[in-house]
Every structure is written in structure tokens, then in C-alpha cells.
Image: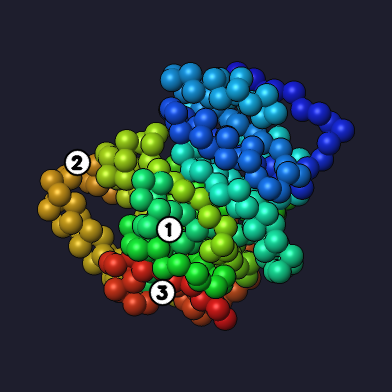
């Protein structure tokens, strides 16, 4: 059973910062310390523990009594954990940050300033740098390729320095800002995904109703990455990434684009599997693909709902993607300013 810490009901902050923790270790304390140092102080912090066994959430909550501590009682996964916390949040805006991500002091202020610059935009993404080497990008917004493969723009590439804000396909859930009521109205993250690609799925559903996402490169966090899952190439990460990528593609791609891009999707899947084989990664990608195919009925049921509420045509979705195959294979940053 979940245990929820008390909240001062007399206060309604502008922003609810949500941290979903699972086996986060020492990084969680660093994350919360960085949030405590934010220049934008009109916020609450909700720390949701997904039944960690390392004691880090309890220790961090004790060290930061201003944090509202929630114990889920089980490992809900990232998607359901965020949804749970969103129901408890009271701010108009909800900021998500991973427990192994460390925000610059002006991170939240910069994102909130962007809401004034783009008053009609509901979702904003950040610049994520590698914590161990901040000269490298962890990501600058999420990109969707024409083959239906999402990727984090610029991952492991050199930080390009000053970059103007603009549209990306979707925000990375590791450091994003979203209008809370909009998030809930759209259904939040798809809990069937558990973790990985739930942020891309949410951004895709935004795109289907004509809502863009803006990346704010001046809003910076430093991210360790995949702390709970054992690394981006762990069996856990590869399995969930492979399965969820297929589900997101089937669920959200408009009919015309689905049939036009299906050969590209199959070809790219085959090329990716060859790369896994070259790395001697065999079992996890096949398990993920088979689980994705086995669960296609789930994705197709979700597809009917997503397509029923779609308000834009295939061309609008196609324009939001990148059709340059080198962008995908080189993981380039793709920011659109139109």
C-alpha cells in the first residue's frame, strides 16, 4: 500500500517537481541538493519511491524535510510512478527530473521563462549533459526518424554550445516541464510501457492533436543515465526499449504513414539487430521483439483510441520527423524552427 507524506494545503506552488526513484543510490541526494538550490523557489518537490531496497529515498527524504515523500509500496515503473505523483501534485506546471540528474541552479527558472515566451506551448525539454563528462551531450530533445525509430538528439556527441530554442519531436522525461492538467487530460504516460519510450509516446500523442514540444537548450541538467536499469545496453534496457519502440510505432503512426514507413521500420529493425549481434547482445533484443509482437493486440487497441482523437493529418506528423537516415544512425540533434 502506498504511503503519502503530508502536504501544507495552504500553499499552491507554481511548479511541482517530481522525482521517481528506484535503486538510485548516492545520486538521489545530489539530485535533491541541486533542486534545493534552484533560483526559482515557487515549487514543491515530490519524491516517489518505487520500493527501492537501497534505503536511499528514505535517507534523502530525512535529509530534505521540505520534500514530500511518497512510498509506492511496489515498483510501479517510471510511467505509472509519474502518473501517481501527478495526481498528488498541485502546481500548474509539473517538472520531471530523473534521480540521477543534477539540475543547474537556473534550470527551473529558465524553463519557466520559456512558458512566458511560448504561452501556448504545453511541454518543454531540457539540455542534458553527461554527468561524468559535461562536454558530451546526453540529449537535446527527442527525435523521431521517418523509420519510426525515436532517439535522443545528440546522444554521446559533443555539446554544440549555444543553441536557439525550437521544436523537437518530444521531450525527454528525464528533464522536462509539462502543464499538469494537460498531462492528466491526455492520459499521462502509458503505464503499459513500464519504462523507456513513455516520454516519446506522450510527445507523439501531443503531436497527433497538434501540440508541439519546445526544447530549451539554456535549461541544463547533468545526467548519469540508466542507474536503475544497469546501463543503456543492459538486458533490461534493451528488452524494454525494443518492445516499447514497436508499440509506440504501431500505436501512434497515422495510417498513411504507417504503410509508407513499414518497410523502413522493418529494415531499420534488422540493421539494429545486426548491431546487437556485433556486440554479442542476442537474447534481450529478440525477447523484446517477440514480446512486442505478442502484445500487438494491446498496441492496436491503444491505436484505435489514439487515432480517434487525432486532429492533424499525416503531413503534419511527417514534417515533425527527420527523414535523413544519417540523423538516426549518427544521433544528430534535430531542432525545427517552423
User: How far across and down, in percent of the image, does residue 177 sit?
Assistant: 62, 53
User: How far across and down, in percent of the image, does residue 224 sit?
Assistant: 40, 43
Residue density around tag 3, few if under 14, some if 14–19, many if 20 or more, within 10 Å: many
> Does label 3 or label 1 sit earlier along the sequence?
1
Give the CA distance from mark 2 to mark 3: 30 Å
Instruction: Tell me the element at label 2.
Output: helix
- Residue lying furthest right in this view? 10
Q: Nearer the viewer, residue 37 or 205?
A: 37
In the rendered structure, the answer to whether residue 268 lies left or right of residue 297 reads left
Question: Which one is closest to the eye, mark 2 or mark 3?
Answer: 3
- The label on residue 322 is 3
- Residue 76, visible in the rendered structure: no
Residue density around tag 1, few if under 14, some if 14–19, many if 20 or more, within 10 Å: many
Residue 266 occupies quadrant: bottom left
Residue 146 occupies quadrant: bottom left
Q: Which residue is mark 2?
A: 283
Write the residue at 70% across / 61% down: 113
- The label on residue 139 is 1
> Does label 1 or label 2 sit earlier along the sequence?
1
- The label on residue 78 is none
Instruction: Tell me the element at label 3.
Output: loop
Vertical comparison of 203 with 166: above or below: above
Task: Indicate how the structure is coloured in the image.
Answer: rainbow
Give the CA distance from mark 1 to mark 2: 27 Å
Write the residue at 36% across / 45% down: 132
> Does label 2 or label 3 sit earlier along the sequence?
2
Write the residue at 36% across / 50% down: 133
Amino acid at each position: 500500500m502506498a504511503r503519502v507524506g503530508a502536504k501544507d494545503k495552504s500553499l499552491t506552488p507554481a511548479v511541482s517537481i517530481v522525482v521517481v526513484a528506484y535503486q538510485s543510490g548516492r545520486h538521489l541526494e545530489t539530485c535533491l541538493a541541486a533542486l534545493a538550490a534552484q533560483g526559482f523557489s515557487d515549487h514543491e518537490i515530490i519524491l516517489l519511491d518505487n520500493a527501492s531496497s537501497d534505503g536511499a529515498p528514505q535517507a534523502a527524504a530525512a535529509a530534505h524535510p521540505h520534500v514530500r515523500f511518497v512510498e509506492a509500496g511496489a515498483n510501479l515503473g517510471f510511467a505509472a510512478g509519474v502518473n501517481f505523483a501527478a495526481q498528488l501534485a498541485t502546481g500548474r506546471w509539473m517538472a520531471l527530473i530523473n534521480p540521477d540528474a543534477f539540475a543547474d541552479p537556473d534550470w527551473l527558472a529558465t524553463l519557466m521563462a520559456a512558458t512566458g515566451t511560448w504561452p501556448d506551448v504545453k511541454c518543454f525539454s531540457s539540455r542534458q549533459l553527461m554527468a561524468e563528462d559535461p562536454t558530451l551531450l546526453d540529449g537535446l530533445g527527442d527525435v523521431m526518424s521517418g523509420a519510426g525509430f525515436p532517439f535522443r538528439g545528440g546522444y554521446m556527441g559533443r555539446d554544440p554550445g549555444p543553441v536557439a530554442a525550437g521544436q523537437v519531436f518530444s521531450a525527454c522525461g528525464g528533464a522536462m516541464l509539462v502543464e499538469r492538467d494537460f498531462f492528466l487530460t491526455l492520459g499521462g504516460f502509458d503505464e503499459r510501457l513500464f519504462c523507456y519510450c513513455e516520454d516519446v509516446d506522450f510527445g507523439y500523442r501531443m503531436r497527433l492533436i497538434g501540440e508541439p514540444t519546445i526544447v530549451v537548450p539554456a535549461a541544463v541538467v547533468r545526467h548519469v543515465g540508466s542507474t536503475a536499469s544497469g546501463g543503456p545496453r543492459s538486458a533490461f534496457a534493451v528488452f524494454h526499449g525494443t518492445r516499447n519502440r514497436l508499440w509506440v510505432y504501431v500505436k501512434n503512426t497515422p495510417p498513411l504513414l504507417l504503410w509508407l514507413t513499414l518497410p523502413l521500420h522493418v529494415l531499420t529493425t534488422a540493421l539494429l539487430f545486426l548491431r546487437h549481434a556485433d556486440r554479442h547482445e542476442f537474447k534481450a533484443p529478440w525477447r523484446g521483439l517477440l514480446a512486442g509482437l505478442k502484445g500487438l493486440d494491446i498496441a492496436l487497441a491503444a491505436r484505435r483510441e489514439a487515432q480517434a482523437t487525432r486532429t492533424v493529418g499525416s503531413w503534419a506528423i511527417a514534417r515533425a520527423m527527420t527523414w535523413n537516415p544519417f540523423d538516426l544512425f549518427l544521433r544528430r540533434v534535430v531542432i525545427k524552427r517552423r
